[in-house]
Amino acid sequence: MIQKILRATALTGAAVVILALSSCDSAQRTIYLKDAEVAKTYGVKYDSGIVIQKGDKLGITVTSLRNPELALPFNAKGLVAAAKTQSTLPTVSLPEGVNEPNSPDAQLSYLVDANGNIQFPVLGTLQVQGMTLEQVSEIIRTRLVAEKYLVDAHVVTKFDNLRVMLLGAFMALTTFNTNATSLTDRGSFHLDNPQTNVLELISRVGGLSEQADFERVSVIRRVGNEYAYYRLNMLSKDIFDSPAFYLQQNDIIYAEYKYQKKDSEAKLLSTITYVTSALSTLVTAMALITVLKK
């Protein structure tokens, strides 16, 4: 009889311990957008795109198929090359806000100053704040053609410092994953695409950690001299309706912790200790009852 009780008690204790251990892994099986319906489309409510702000750095490249040498003065990279050689092309001094590259092949950036301007070679001061990349490219192209510098000018503008900041329970932060794409320094993530949404970001940094609260991912965004605060529930399709679904430059994304790892380990140890103590007491009581009955 005693052996049966001990066997049953041992099996019960093992089951309780296994259940406690498996509960710590439940966060890893969290389903994103679990209320979304299969084969149903969801429109994004806010998709205005990123516009240029003060402090942005722009990479602007001007090319010409007919006369590529005439495009050289309109490229910051080309200006440095021309300055280092005895070129017969028109010489133009480096504009304010353009920095000397570390290597001849480095792409130079145009800094958007406190007034929202950049200093562009030959064309001078250009107001770019509040514009899209495409608008800046078109303005420069139009002026180059209209002022007869280049009849077939082609202009490409991109962000050179497009990044967001990560805080909290991201896998790339909690595991110090230095191989995460574009995670060049802890907490700073560089975006290759100005149309990056929060789901793409989470995917590229390895996902949220098992300690994250998937219903409490916050985005802090600077708007002028103020900050806007958005809360995203990654388990709900409602994220498509949030202004923070598409990321902006210098956004701060904070994934809150549901529990700390040390706290969870302490709770698990406490649970196992409590179960073991209770089972031990039960076995002792059953043994005493059996002895007294004899």
Image (cartoon, rainbow, N blue to C red):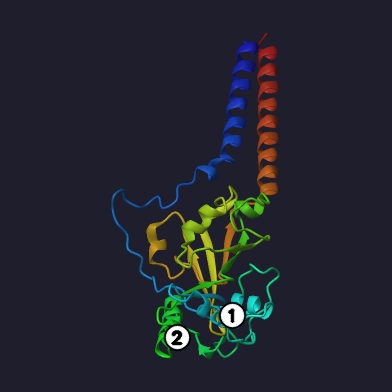
Residue located at (42% from left, 68% from top): 242
Q: Is residue 109 visible?
A: no
Looking at the rendered structure, the secondary structure element under dot 1 is: strand
Q: Which residue is mark 1?
A: 110
**Quadrant assignment for the N terminus:** top right
- The residue type indicated by label 2 comes to Leu
Vertical placement of residue 125 versus 206, above or below? below
Residue located at (66% from left, 25% from top): 282
Query: Where residue 202 sits: x, y (%)?
Result: 52, 56
Which of labels 2 and 1 is toward the front?
Answer: 2
Q: Which sits in the foreground, 111 or 286?
A: 111
Query: Where residue 30 sits: x, y (%)?
Result: 49, 46
Vertical placement of residue 54 versus 63, above or below? below
Query: Where residue 238 sits: x, y (%)?
Result: 39, 61
Looking at the rendered structure, the secondary structure element under dot 2 is: helix
Q: Residues within 10 Å of mark 2 (few under 14, many from 20)?
A: many
* Left or right: where 39 falls relative to 73: left
Q: Which residue is mark 2?
A: 144
Residue located at (58% from left, 47% from top): 210
Q: CA distance from mark 2 to mark 1?
A: 18 Å
